[in-house]
Amino acid sequence: MTEPPFASRERLRKHQQYFQSMHKHTHLKGRYDKITSVAIPLALAASTTFLLARGIYNMSQGIGKKE
């Protein structure tokens, strides 16, 4: 018992030729790949930098110490 293919061979070949002919990096070939490989890491780095800076400032000023 065989399962029907997810997509036709012609469609898969068309997509394969399209992606192989592009002259971009492999992780930036799709339409939304820039969001997952550029925007999300930049947002994580920015929030981490902000939280570290706030923590260092609070420690230097003595803010938030428990008695």
Image (tube, helix red, strand yellow):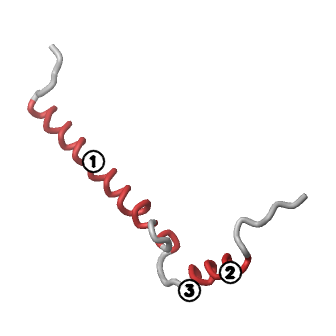
Tell me the amino acid under the disc marked 2: Arg
- Name the kind of residue labelled 3 in the image: Ser
* Residue 12 image position (x, y, % from top left): 67, 76
The residue where tag 1 is placed is 47
Disc 3 designates what residue? 21
Task: State the residue at coordinates (11%, 27%).
Answer: 62
**Residue 39 in picture, x, y percent from top left:** 35, 60
Tag 1–tag 2 contact (CB < 8 Å): no
Relative placement, left or right, of 29 versus 14 is left
Which image quadrant for residue 51? top left
Work out which residue is located at the far top of the displayed protein and give it. Answer: 67
Q: Which amino acid type is shown beneath numbered disc 1?
A: Ser
Relative to 33, does residue 57 appear above or below in the rendering? above
**Tag nearer the camera, 2 or 3:** 2
Single out the mark in the foreground, 1 or 3. Answer: 3
Front residue of 62/43: it is 43
Q: Position of residue 2 (x, y in %)?
A: 87, 61
Q: Earlier in the sequence, mark 1 or mark 2?
A: 2
Helix, strand or loop for disc 3: helix
Tell me: residue 12, above or below residue 39: below
Against 48, residue 22 (above or below) is: below
Q: Secondary structure at mark 2?
A: helix
Lower position in the chain sequence, tag 1 or tag 3: 3
Q: Give the label on residue 13, or none.
A: 2
Number of numbered markers: 3
**Mark 2 nearby-residue class (10 Å; few <14, some 14–19, many ≥20):** few
